[in-house]
Image: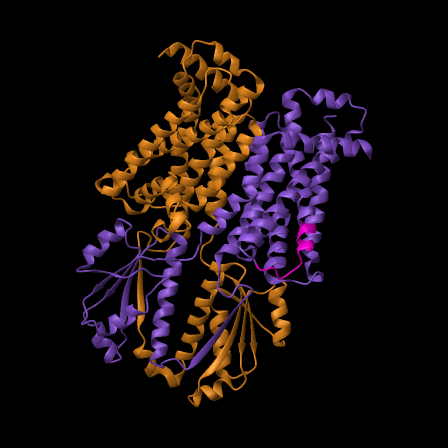
Chain colours: A orange, B purple
Amino acid sequence: MKTGIIKAYIKKELLDLYRSKMIFMVYIMPTMILLLFGYGIKIDVTDTRTLIIDNDRSKLSYDLISEFEHSRYFNTRVERLTEAKALDLIKQNRKDLIIIIPEAFERELTKGLQVAVGVYIDGSFPSRAKTIENYTTGVIFNAVMKQPGFQNRNQELIRINSRSLFNQAMSDKNMILPGLIGLVLFVAPAILSALLIVKEKEKGTIFNFYASPVKKNEFILAKLLPVLILHSTNIIILFLWAVYLFKVPFRGSFMFYAGASFIYIIISISIGLLVSIITSTQIVAVILTLIITIIPGFLYSGMLMPISSMEGESAIVAHIYPVMYYTHILYDVFLVGDGLSAGKNQLYFGILTGYAFLLLGAGSFFLKKRIK
Amino acid sequence: MRSFLTVTGKELLEFLRSYGLLFVVIYSFTLDIYIAGKGITLDAKNISIGVVDYSPGVISNKILLHLHQPQFQKPVFFHSQEELMESIRNRKIMAGILFESDFEKRFLTKNNPEINLLLDSTAATQSFLTLNYLEHIIFKFQKTLSLSPVRIEIHKLFNPNTSYVFFMALSELLSIITLLSVVLTAAVFVNEKENGTWDIMLLMPVNPKIVILAKSFSQVIIIMAGVIISVGIVLFGIFDLPMNGSLSVFMLLTFFYAFTSAGIGLFIASITHNIMQVAQVSVLIMMPIIFLSGAWTPVYAMHPVLQFLSIFSPLRYYIQGSESIFFRGTDLIDLWKYFAGVIFLGSILFWIGARKIGKLF
């Protein structure tokens, strides 16, 4: 190891990043993504644009309507329209849900007959459609059960007494933010490092490296360290946003969080460097990095879909990507708090470390010190 | 006109000859969309269930019979609540059901029976859906006891089986279109800056306006070709996506949208000096645009300020328009606002972008 050369290289890289104003991006981008998505993404469905067509106009149907009007899940309007006209409104994307209360709704119900209520849901966004379906059946059911004739039946009903572990309030932010940190720390360092080597190739300055006495590993180290130094600060910045701005509980140990994040950033940078080494033009490197980091970062983090319910190819791919292991640790330090005492956390921490070495090894394997 | 075609042709040729870029673009229009559509359902599937049953077990088993594939894995039985908690902590079990010892008695004597449900809420969407499913199952279970007098007839329009494949594949395609048209257009200009061929371009006896237009047009062509490949092979060929509207209307909307994002690309190209900055600035500009488009949270559920801001996201009109064409089969006349939105914002963005970069000529 020639520390002098490495030091010089690091200084040059830092200066380069500083002069091209990239240094601001290092800190603006992660924070911006965290704030935007942290405030913006809602998993719960609220304000469903609802249209109720009341053909009955009885006390019961008014009760039913007022149940909908008082629910924050629905934004209800009552109008007199034909069914076809109403369905057109869904087609034009102006309503999400249409409920049609039939004539003689109350009368037949009190006679003890079964009555059908028609419900039409816009199914273009599948998970939202499903949630709307369940909320709607629940509201209608409860409204009917509140009627005097059904009080005694009410007592027979089984109630679900649900408790969300690790996140009592079922707060969206608590669920999303740890996953977001995992996404940001995967994407941002990779984008920054993806161009570091391919840039030199395209400009021709890579010949400095070919001709200089610096070794391959030293070169990679010199490219990796500046980005690592800059991005390490983000570990703390993102943590502060999450805990103090979004008030996400932090139950684990900070050292464990910082350590895992540090290794994770090394992985992300190594992926960027690998892309940089195998591509020959910058634009290819940019698009490739965006595609292999952002999309899997979202999909395989376990934020959208728990790994335990994946099957087939996607389960395999999810285990190949390092995102899943880190997100597991993140959720643990934020919401669960078992830390290194849990076997699974130790294992995943080990896997992450393995990844870092593997990717760096691959990088130094593919990097050539002469023209092919 | 001839010089317009020459510049366009030159850019297309350059694109076709850079094999790496060609490969990445084709990959993102085909395999990437395939993976997103195939691999991911936001649906709660295969939910792992743990059960602790302190009750005699007659009624509880009847309820558990309703938990089956594809939503639920076979329930795993535990002896005590502590064991169950341990499994949830290690994320082997996502939802735990606990029957108290007096559950059956209360059920039979009609005295407000209760089930306790423990949810691992670290998987956000799924814990909501799991709760929903279980409520639904209990609801159905009661119905078999003919407790409910109302029959609720649910019609899910456009997508009766709530398949996620169509939705994910289409969303992925729209994101890819946005990403590529911005980055490619910006790169076409910045490449010249970086390679030093910018000066050669300035010396060409061609009106700068034509150069700008031709260069952006060439990238729009590339995007359109990619969209045709992707819609033809992946969406229709492999996924058999239903088409309720007209394909040519979608292509037309895509064409206008590609120009809109090209305008954003022009703007980025005018303020950056190298590809590294292009990458960073594009992410910085595109994130809010994607975010405000309502792709993840519907616009009407956003904060009022964000709702107002979302008017300025061209992607909003494009996504809603495309979904309306593919899924809802909206009539052409009712699509006017999406076209108006895309074209209006597109002309402004393209004009600003072209003006900004035109100053460099």
Which residue is painted at 64% across and 72% down in the image? A85
| A292 sits left or right of B203 in the view | left
Residue lying furthest bottom:
A111
The residue segment tinted magenta is: B242-253
Which quadrant holds residue B327? bottom right
Comparing A159 with A125, the one in front is A125
Residue B165 at x, y percent in the picture: 50, 55
Residue B246 in magenta stretch: yes
The answer to whether residue A265 is magenta is no
- Horizontal side of residue B22 vs A44, given as left or right: right
Q: Is residue B103 above or below residue A342?
A: below
**B120 over B112 or under it: above or below:** above
Residue drawn at x 17%, y 59% as measured from the top left:
B80
Above-or-below relation of B74 to A182: below
Residue B295 seen in the current view: no
Asked which quadrant contains residue B359, the reply is top right
The N terminus of chain A lies in which quarter of the figure? top left
Residue A193 versus residue A60 in the image, above or below: above
| Residue drawn at point x = 22 percent, y = 52 percent | B86
Relative image position of residue A165 (x, y in whole percent): 30, 54
Q: Choose between B166 and A168: the one closer to the eye.
A: B166
Question: Residue A233 location, x and y as percent?
Answer: 40, 29
Give percent across and percent down for residue B83. 19, 55
